Every structure is written in C-alpha cells, then in structure tokens.
Image (tube, grey):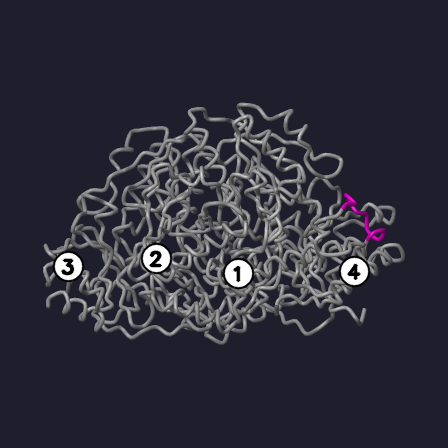
Amino acid sequence: MRYLPHTEDDIALMLEAIGATDLDELFAMIPPQCRKDGELRIPGPLTEWELERTAQELAETMGAGRDYVVFLGAGSYEHFIPATIRYLLGRSEFTTSYTPYQPEISQGTLQAVYEYQTLVSRLLGMEIANASLYDGASALAEALLASVRITRHDRVAVSQALHPHYRQVAETYLQSTGFEVVELPFDGDGRTDLSRISGEKGFAAVAIQSPNFFGCIEDLQRAANLSHDTGALLVVCFSEPLAYGLLKNPGSCGADIACGEGQSFGVPQSFGGPGLGIFATRMAHVRNMPGRLVGRTRDLDGNRGFTLTLATREQHIRREKATSNICTNNSLCAVAAAMYMASLGGNGLRSLASMNRDKAEYLKRELASAGFSPRFSAPTFNEFVVQAPSGFHQAYERLLEKKIVAGLPLAGYYPELDDCYLLCATETKSKADMDALVREIRS
Amino acid sequence: MKDFPGANGLVLNERLLWEKGKPGRCGMSLPEADVDPVPMDENLVGEIPDWPGLSEVEVVRHFTRLSQWNYGVDSGMYPLGSCTMKYNPKINDQIAALNGFAHAHPLLPALLSQGALRLMHELGLLLAEITGMDAVSLQPAAGAQGELAGMLILFAYHRSMGKPRKKIIVPDTAHGTNPASAALCGFKPVGVKSGPLGILTPEAIAEIMDEDTAGIMVTNPNTLGLFEEHIQDISEIVHGNGGLVYCDGANMNALMGRGHVGKMGVDVLHLNLHKTFSTPHGGGGPGAGPICVTQSLERFLPVPRVVKDGDRYSLSTDYPDSIGRLHGFYGSFAVMVKAYAYILSMGPLLKQASNLAVLNANYVKARLKGVLDIAYDRPCMHECVFSDKLQRSSKVTTLDIAKRLIDYGFHPPTIYFPLVVSGAIMVEPTETESKEEIDLFIEAIKSIVKEAEEDPEKLKQAPRRTKVRRLDETSAARNPCLTG
C-alpha cells in the first residue's frame, strides 16, 4: 500500500528494538473480549484509478456543474471562484498543517488569518473578528451564548425570518441550558416584527438576519435602538455577506455582534459543508468571544509576527469555564475567504454586489410578468420570495427534467407560505439563463 | 546537522495585504453586466469597505510567500501527539473537488443529490463496521461538536428516563475539549485521577459514580497513549448506576481492525475524520466529527439523517426524539468525501495502518528510553508521552527541546499535554512515517539532549532557522492587536 512505507525488514527490525515477537503482541493489552473478531468487512483496497471511477460515478448523479441552472440560495450561494484560490489553497503548507500551536513555523496561516480577521471586521463595521467557527448556524448559536454571558440575562429573541436551520441549531445548542428562546414573527413586508420586544426587559440578545431568509433587508438601525432600549445586545446574522458590499453594514447600524456564513467568499458549496462561520464583535466583548484569535506581536529580534492569543478563554486552558468548546475550526475556509477578499478588493466587491442585486431584480420583474407576485414588499438583495400561480408545482418538476432548479419551495419551512418559492440569482446567472427560466415557465 | 532536514534557505518578506496594492486594482474577473442597473434606496446603501485593490499577480505572490512560512505534513514529520498528522492522500482532495461534489447545492431535490446521499450513507456504514458501533451521524463539524452531540444525547437519554442528571465523570487523561463540551450541556464535570499505571481503575470510578451522574467521558486510548484496560468493568459500573459511557475516539488510529468499541461497553463514540481518516487539517480545520451510537440510542442522533429505501436515498427529519440539528446543512461534506476515498483506498488494510501506527510509537519509545524520561513505561498504543525530567538539571525545558527540534527540520510533538505529566512531550509518529524518517527524528532528539548538557543556550535561542524567532506571547495577550 503506497501510504505505508514499512517493508517486512523494517517491521522485523523495529519489533526487535521493541522486544516484541510480532505485531499482535503490541495489542496484547486489549482484553480479548474487547477485540475485533476477524478482518474488517469493508470493500477495497481500490487503486487510485478504480477509486476515481467510483467517485466520478457518484458525482455525475448530482444536479451540479455546467449542465444545470440552479436558482437556489437559502444559505448556500453559487458564486464564481477565481482559479487562483483553488491553486493557492492547494499549497500543501496551508492544507497539511495543524492548528498553529508553533507560531515560528506557522506564520503563513497566522498572517493569513490575521488578514481575514481584519478584512471581515472592515466589511462588517466591527472592531474584531475571530479566526472562524464551523458555519453560520453555529456562529449564531455561539453569539446567543456569548450574549447570555455578557448580559447575564437568560432569554433570547430570535426572528422567524432568520434561516430556519440556523434557528434549529441554536435551539439544539440551548436545549440543555434552560435559556428561553422567544421567536419574533415577520410582518407583511417580510421584515421582523419587533413590537414583541419593545418595553420588555430581560433579553440577552435580539437576533435578526439581514438580508433575511426571504432575502429582505431588515431595518438594522431600528432593531439596534429597540434592542438597546431593552438592555439586549443586537445580534445581526447573515447568510450572504456579499450583501455588505452594497448595504450599510451591521456595525454602522449599531450591532453588538455580527455573525453568519462566509461560504460566498471563495468556498465551494460542497453540498453544504464545510462552510465558514464568521463571528465579529466589539473590542469590549473580546474576553467573552468564542473561538481562536490571532494577534500581532514581535519576536525576539523585534520583527513583526503573529500568534494565537487570548487562549485563556479557550477550552484547553479554561476547561469547563471556557467561552466555547470549539477547538478545530474552519481555518482553511477563512484563508480561502482572505484570498477571495484580497482578489476582489473594495471596488470589485461593490461592483459584484450591485450586479447580484441587479440580476435578482431583473428576475423578479420577469417572473412578475409571468404571473408570479412578489410575496413581500421590503427591498431585497440577491434572492426573493414569490407566490407562484396555481399549478406551478407540476411545472417545477418539469423544469427539473430540463436541468433547471426553479428556486426553493417554502411550504416545508413555513406552512403559511404554501405556494411560495425562494429564488436566487447571483452573478453566475446570465440574462439568457433567466430568460430561459421564464420562457420555460410560460410554455 | 547536515543529515537532518532543517536547513537555511531564501525566505521572502511579505507585507500585510493592505500595505500593498492600489485602489483601482482588482484581481478577479467580473462578468459583463447584461441587465439594467436598478437603483437602490440610498438610505440602505453603505460605504465601500476599505479592502485593498490588488492584481492577480500580487495576490498569488502574497499567499505563495505566506505558505512558505508554514510547515505541513508534506514538509516533513509532524509527530504532534493526539492530532494524528498522517499523510493526506492527494487523490482524495481531487475527488472532493469533482464538479458534482464541490458545486452541489445542499438543497437540491433528493432526485438530483443521489450520489452525495449514497456516499454519506455508505460512509456511515463503513464507520459502523470499523468501530463496531450500530448507527452513525456524520453531521458534527469537528471533534468538539461531536462531543457536544454526544453530551446532548446523554442529556436527552436521561430526560427520556424521566430523571435528568447533573454530573459527568471526566478523567485527567481525557482530551482538553471534554470538560468544555460537557459544561456546554449543563453538566458539571467531576474529575477522576488515573491510577498508578496511567489508566483508570474500576475502584476510582465506583467511588464517584452515582445516580446523579449522567455517565463518563473516557478517551480510549487515553492521552497517555495507553489503552484503558478496565474499560469493560468501568462500563459495567457506569451502566449499573444508570449512566452512559461516552468515548472520545480521537485516538481511533490505534484501534482499527483491532478493537471493537461496541464490545467495550461504549454507548456513544465520536471520531475525527481529520485524524484517523487522513483528511487534511487545513491549519486548524475544517474537520468532521461523526458520532457513533448503540442501537438503543439511535433515536437521539442529530437530524436530518440519510435514509435508504430500495435503491433510493433521501433525507429525513422524522425522528421525534432526536437532539436536533447541529449544522446549517449536513456537516462537512467535502471532508466526508475525502474520508470515504481514504477508507476505500485502504480497505481491510486499515488494520495494518493501526498496526504500524502502534509499531512506530513503541519504536520511538524504545529507542528514546533513557534519553528522555518516559512518564509511564508500559507498552503504548499509537503515541507515547515523555517529559523533560532528565533535562531539568541543565535548566532546559520541554519548550526549549520543542523549539530546537524545529531547527533540525521536524515539527515538534505536542507539549505540556496531557496535564498529568509535568513537562509532557507527546509523540505520535503515525503509520505513514518510514523507519528512516523516525530514526532521523530519534537522532535529532538525542543530539538536542546532548546540546542541552553542553550548550543549553542553543536550545534557549531556538529556533534560529525560521522566518521569525520566538514570539512575545505575553504582550500579545496583554495588549491584543487582532486587526490591522
């Protein structure tokens, strides 16, 4: 086997040095009743070429790649990824290293993550960002837990227009803690109805997503004022960070924590994972922050260098009093995001964000002319909800056969939005793609 | 030091991203606008973020230079104990990058995601066979999230029995994340010391196990690299008091084809695909931390789960007792693809991987006996723990030895962990290191130990061959500078 370098001679010499007669003897301490009987019943070993064919066969069954035109968003976005990113991420010094515990031989990862923290903070208008969490959903859960630690209040308010999966994950994280989760409904324009929190005290956090699950842009400024009036932190969540290339960022609107999913920034969709959990906040909350942080410092010669820092918050030092149990995070995805943000630059980001909105507005208008009415009136970014004309369900299935995925049916997520679909159009959708969709729907 | 890999070479300086470039540059091609612009309400529009403008060449040089300041498994031996830094096969990365996998939207209809669902289903079955457990969820995104899932299952189990419990036993040889994961679920970790042989004694567990204790979190093999030989007795005691046994399986690389975790009495086990199953660690992730359970706990596994009906696969959330969802979608799918590819590449030879991992560790231990102090001089599994006890008279510490190893061209072992050994040096060679490479590592340690006696300053000043020298970590923490 090509990954196992030992020859028979090597094994014999090594056993001799150890003083064992055979390999079985090395496992003598495993009590017989705890041992695996017989050989592992698994297929293989496959050659590299057999493996490739097997995998290719599985991959080819997927509705992905150039043949398919997919108008899905809802937390995972198709964006162009420059070839440079795959190439640079393939540098095995980045890929095959561990968490940078030895900073002298990890400066590459450390500087890249420091740059990621900086560019993300600038995007979100926050003072600091951590080195990444798993995904947008766990970032929300961690933000709620951090809010409870900071405010010492024991209930949180979460918008129903926040991604249903994120809310479910937050519920999973909170279920054994006894903290209460109050859901805030959305109103007719597709934004969160904040009346439930006004005048009420005792919330640790008010969490809303913008653009929200329906693609609607929330009034963050108002949410910040209302949250702060009640003594709660405002947690602004997002699944599409590209929106902040165009929109006012959470920090400038008064958010205390900005958290969400960074997959849009150079991370392939990969059937939903790995993603990139982004977590940013104000310096005042740094000691309550979950996850790893990279800080700038100097070496013995006075040269600039980077190291993991403030580890006293973390599990391996603080043990059961840690701010989070996270250890391995999604560092390589953060490095991918740093490469993406560096490639795009501020002006590129604005152009790309505007283009996403323009495409979605075009599709919205064209669909309206085909009998789909926008379900919500609030402004949107690159995805939106439409109410489909009756009988569209059959057309949806027919479109699948033509390799077009005409958005996400929302009935399974929101029973009250039966007949509604969430459609997304990013820069990857050409006018011709969108015209083809509308033409097919009409036919 | 001419025989050792450590050498000087041209390493280039590189500024921070925002110290380079010019506004107006862009390193990415953008598609032409083919629809009319639609003006946005000005009240909603924000400032353009202050990101530097860089050309493609500048971006490529920047990150290429940065990468050269890193050490990875592809650079050389990386015997970081507890982390299983084995070789990461390249074909696996290539497979995960196949269009059908890398560009698949997670909410595609089941009809258009059969390949991914089938792969997940089969990987679950393979992991069940390798561990001897009954059912598997691949959803946790890393080991610590697997631990969280496991703790939530313990919580849900006791709640279903009508009597929630407050405490959990965590031995001093458990992984560092364990107490934090338990506390996140509201459990109070109760410590227990390992016995004189470095493993747990049934007596110590019997003494503290009671009816308010949800169970035990045991790492097996433990962080001393020792197999918990009394695991069955311990499981019996815990079960006898109505508790459950959680096993941290981060060290599964010692047991493939050898141990049957189910028979040990373990109820819940997590695995690290980025350790045992060779997926690259990426400088800190992403990983994947599947959890494996016995049949009676299957109903608590996270949702959604992949179900097979005839030859069709779909996702189901129809498990009312489930602890719920842990990930925005289904976990680190790309990592699962790599682990699946690894398992099929190895087949039943996974057992030989564990054989050689254990052989390599015992060989290091035998050859360094007397050179470094061995904390527990007994047959070890996939890793062995030394300390700086013999070097203390030279006023040289574990940290100095580790830093000096860098100059010799090796990644240092895990240091100062486990906490039960003062000045611990935890070596996990893994099976993919050849005898020659290990011999060189052993020679490096011997040479460093000699230097410690003759010229300890060489160790104190190490490393000298790296891009930066030792860093001022104290001031980094005192005056944190986290963004530029």
In the shown orientation, is residue B380 left or right of residue A79? right
The chain containing the residue under callout 4 comes to B
Give the residue furthest to the right: B454
Q: Earlier in the sequence, mark 1 or mark 4?
A: 1
Tell me where residue A64 appears, x and y as whole percent: 33, 67
Is any part of residue A311 visible from this angle? Answer: yes
| Circle 1 or circle 4, nearest the eye | 1
- Residue type for callout 4: Ile
Q: Name the residue that disc number 2 marks.
A: B106
Is any part of residue A292 visible from this angle? Answer: no
Residue B235 inside the magenta-drawn segment: no
Q: Earlier in the sequence, mark 2 or mark 4?
A: 2
Q: Is residue A46 above or below residue B484?
A: below
Looking at the rendering, the stretch of residues picked out in magenta corresponds to B369-378
Give the residue furthest to the front: A38
Return the residue nearer the eye: B267 or A441: B267
| Circle 4 or circle 3, nearest the eye | 3
- Secondary structure at badge 2 equals loop
| Residue A394, numbered circle | 3
